[in-house]
Amino acid sequence: MTSNDVARRAGVSQSTVSLVMSGKARGRVSAATEDAVRRAAAELGYRPNVAARALRLGAARSVALVVPDVTNPFFGHVMRGAQAAAWTAGYTVALIDTANDPAWELSSYEALRGGPVDGFLVFGIDPPRRRRGARPERIVLIEDESPGHPSVRLDSAAGADAVMTHLLGLGHRRIGRVAAPFERHAFRTREERWRASLAEAGLDPDAMPHARSEIDFAAAHRAARGLLEGPYPPTAIFCDDDILAGGVYLAARDLRLRIPRDVSVVGFDDLAFTLLLDPPLTTVTADAARLGALAFETLAAHMAGERVPRVRQLPVSLTVRGSTAAPRPQRE
Amino acid sequence: MTSNDVARRAGVSQSTVSLVMSGKARGRVSAATEDAVRRAAAELGYRPNVAARALRLGAARSVALVVPDVTNPFFGHVMRGAQAAAWTAGYTVALIDTANDPAWELSSYEALRGGPVDGFLVFGIDPPRRRRGARPERIVLIEDESPGHPSVRLDSAAGADAVMTHLLGLGHRRIGRVAAPFERHAFRTREERWRASLAEAGLDPDAMPHARSEIDFAAAHRAARGLLEGPYPPTAIFCDDDILAGGVYLAARDLRLRIPRDVSVVGFDDLAFTLLLDPPLTTVTADAARLGALAFETLAAHMAGERVPRVRQLPVSLTVRGSTAAPRPQRE
DNA sequence: GAGCTGCCGTCATACGTATGCCTGATCATA
DNA sequence: TATGATCAGGCATACGTATGACGGCAGCTC
């Protein structure tokens, strides 16, 4: 099934078929001919060959989506948003799951340079360095930034501020933190706002219990235990995301601490499972799907040569549920 | 950066470069020349153009992975497994998230027929009907089956049997069910084994509380409430997957029922969040990543023209945790 | 030294599409 | 009626790769 077959059937030349199929028939092909071509194409079930088109055009109408952990529902939503947006734009999404391995991430750029994709949507671990190559690489970063590439992200600063205002407003003075292990911009921002908010409230950030943890329940469980068993346990814990917050629940259960009576917990992202926690988690609600879609749209605009804002932010909002309350009067 | 550039630099012809790069140099190119070509290619950072190769070869070295819900971690693991296996085989994975919409699923086959992918890995909603087309379509089904296509799946029968043996062994006589809404083979099998096990124990399956639910917490919550508030509430509930089981926890919390004292709950898949539930969920542990990898391997073999078993099953095992116990003596 | 056999390597072409350029026909205008 | 102008559509080619068909050359045998 090639355009030649269609041409033969419609009694026209291959060029005419191509013209019609790519919508460039205006003024070059009569309505009657166009009709005949379309009919022939439909009858034969003709689909333009993507490889040939890609070869000719030098573009594959495909983008790579690089994600650190496909197993994490947050990324799932991002993927959904990006994929849907890409699909409606006639693009295909090539999925790369790096499983949190920076080496793998790097090698994926290398491997995909040959042309299977026109651009990259990167939800990365390390910010990709700019790489030399025939054509300048089209990259949009998600939740991170790197000079020279446009990026999209949640408004982590506003989210973290809302969390801290909430917690401080409840009367907490010992607000600990379970941080993600990456140097991603989003996490850095949350850390900074946590520190800044504490400082503004006259508290010393460096005196606060603080831990870093891989983003999975078991690791966060260990990290949170360390925090809660420490000499100065926090009355509230601000986590970089919901998974880490889940780890805090696990630790609290271990130590027979009640949430929020003994310790308040706040997450980030508002994943579905947070409703399952008992009590349900107070967290920052974010539209991850929109984030993915926005990333694709930005990449598409970027590839089309349009000028694109260096960074686009999506609003977030604090959703207060049962995991936060005023601290108990301390014995000290 | 084309093979011509490499050829010029190495002082050979384009064909020689092609020969070397595709590993077909044996007996046609001397070691010295081959070396020179490789060096030139490396210096220029040459990567064969995928589109051109795909056009020439009529194969894209890419497969589509069709998944109903990228947001569900179970599919995340499948994707991870499939993607990793594909990647090491030099294949690219095009992701399709159908968001549980059968129409979308269908249209994705249609759209991808033009050649962007060589085959399909389908974790489908509806079994795809066989479609006519120039070349016979290469499809492997996951967790489902359809005449004419190879399929891979978990051993749902064994899993369900283990669950029922466990529950009946604990003394349960009223074992309800929250079923998934799809006619997928995996779910059908679990249903059948549930019925068969009950019948073998001298119980009437039709008398058991039974509900169907979309696979999300809120829907399962509603469905489970219906079950537990019904005239003959079950002492145990077997759910088609962990998400549905999560809904049962929600309903139990609503109704002030304690798990497992008032009702035992069993899930399927062993997703990470089940550890977070209180008590942790008894469930069937499955290697979803292996399932994805196996699916790809099967597709690759199928495409290579090898004879492939019509169906391949992966073992599963029951993981007993805190959500199951003997029923309380009934008042009736 | 003529003929044969391997070994290395090049030539030419095909894959299917998109598009610049050209041609023939129709039509309007002078 | 002669001359442009406009419209419809075909011709030819290029995109970069893979590969079957060839050709030149060295070494060998008789």
Image (tube, coloured by chain):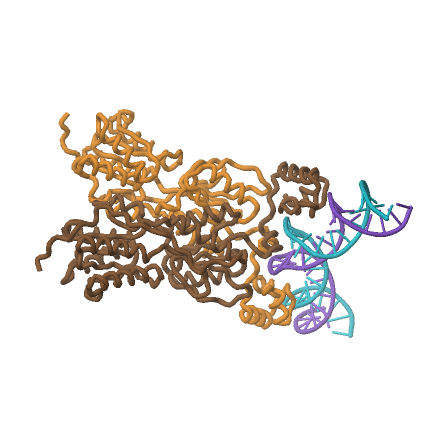
Chain colours: A orange, B brown, C purple, D cyan
Q: B206 or B220: which is nearer to us?
A: B206
Residue B186 in the image: above or below residue A37: above
Would you identify the image quadrant in which residue B43 lies?
top right
Q: Is residue A71 left or right of residue A148?
A: left
Residue A30 in the image: above or below residue B3: below
Residue B298 point in image, percent of width and height: 47, 55
Residue B307 point in image, percent of width and height: 51, 59
Q: Is residue A94 left or right of residue C12?
A: left
Residue B26 point in image, percent of width and height: 67, 45
Q: A303 or B213: which is nearer to us?
A: B213
Quadrant position of the C terminus of chain B in the picture: bottom left
Q: Residue at x 32, y 44 (%)?
A: A269
Would you identify the image quadrant in which residue B277 lies?
top left
Residue A249 point in image, percent of width and height: 24, 39
Asked if residue A293 can be seen in this view, the reply is no
Asked if residue A195 can be seen in this view, the reply is yes
Quadrant position of the N terminus of chain B in the picture: top right
Q: Is residue A95 left or right of residue B194?
A: right
Q: Residue at x 15, y 29 (%)?
A: A330
Q: Is residue C22 left or right of residue B247?
A: right
